[in-house]
Amino acid sequence: MDEPWIRQRCSEAQLATLSVDNDLELTAAACAPAPKQLGSMIVASVALNTDGVGLLSVSLLDSHGESKARGTFEVSEDAALRFEASSLWIDVAPYRLAPDVRAFGIDITSAYIPNCGDGGFGAVRTLYALSDGNIVPVLRDLYMTEWTYLKQPAGRCNPDPEAPDVTVVEEFAKTVQMAETVTNGRQDLVIVGTAQVRSTSAVGSETVEPSTRGRFRHVLKFDGRVYPTTELETAWWKWRE
């Protein structure tokens, strides 16, 4: 794991706290200083077998470098998800869900980026918190960036010989903000979405303009275990139509 492009690098001692199964190969890792309420360091890794199936392991270290809490979660590669060394990013934004509950995020970015089709997705974020000494997910699989092609030039991805010699992409981004309201003892979360249109000519010149959609806003409420996202997903796709 000594690739120079990894932004949140881990030491061997930090990775050792995750105790990777001998049948799995360490594929991706990230380490970042933890908020004081959680510990000293957050360590995350993905280890896979030869079939692309394995575990996402997350550990909170104390000031002595010892693991004070751990969580392991099944992951698997598929047609859209491919892990590489830099696929993990730890988000330590101030997610203060309650006076004594602090969350953090882990972004997973696939190494596979489709160059044809209608569009694609960027990082997927899950928020984790401590519960009875365990690390548990409280908000699952939030796509932070997405894009869709509005125009593509003639070529392999567009068989129309009359297509204009320009690529036009609408780009979508989400942010997670804290609301002032509380549900079931946890702060509500506000998901804010924005969109912009990027045009790229055949010679590489670009223009970026705001989308006419306006801003997306949706409030997530804690149900006692997690922040459900079904209504969010419905509202998001309606906004994107």
Image (cartoon, rainbow, N blue to C red):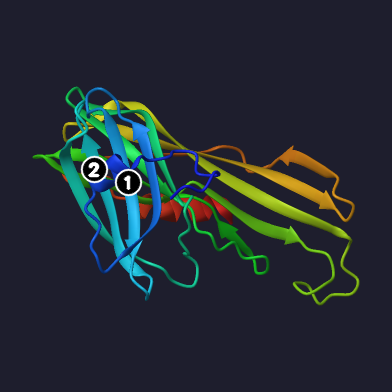
Q: Which mark is on residue 44?
A: 1
Q: Is residue 233 above or below residue 33?
A: below
Element on which disc 2 rests: strand
User: Please, what is the three-letter code of the amino acid marked with disc 2?
Assistant: Ser
* 106 relative position to 113: left or right: left
Identify the disc placed on residue 112: none
Residue found at x 64% / y 58%? 148
Quarter of the image where the C terminus is located: bottom right
One can see residue 9 in this view: yes
**Label 2 close to label 1 by CB (< 8 Å):** yes
Around disc 1, counting alpha carbons within 10 Å, would you say few (fewer than 14), some (14 to 19), or many (20 or more)? many
Identity of the amino acid at label 1? Ala
The answer to which image quadrant residue 168 occupies is bottom right
The residue that appears at 21% across and 53% down in the rendered structure is: 19
Residue at mark 2 = 59
Question: Upstream in the sequence, badge 2 or badge 1?
Answer: 1
User: Which residue is painted at 25% across and 47% down in the image?
Assistant: 16
Image coordinates of residue 77 in percent, x first then y, are 41, 68
Q: Could you tell me residue 118's position as x and y percent?
A: 64, 66
Measured along the vertical axis of the image, is residue 202 above or below residue 107? below
Q: Nearer the viewer, residue 129 or 148?
A: 129
163 horizontally vs 30: left or right: right
- 67 relative to 170, above or below: above
| Residue 226 visible here | no
Residue 162 rendering spot, x and y as whole percentages: 91, 71
Q: Position of residue 38 (x, y in %)?
A: 22, 29
Q: For mark 1, give the secondary structure.
A: strand
From mark 2 to mark 1, how far is it between C-alphas? 6 Å
Estimate how packed mark 2 is, as few (under 14), some (14 to 19) or many (20 or more) residues with alpha carbons within 10 Å.
many
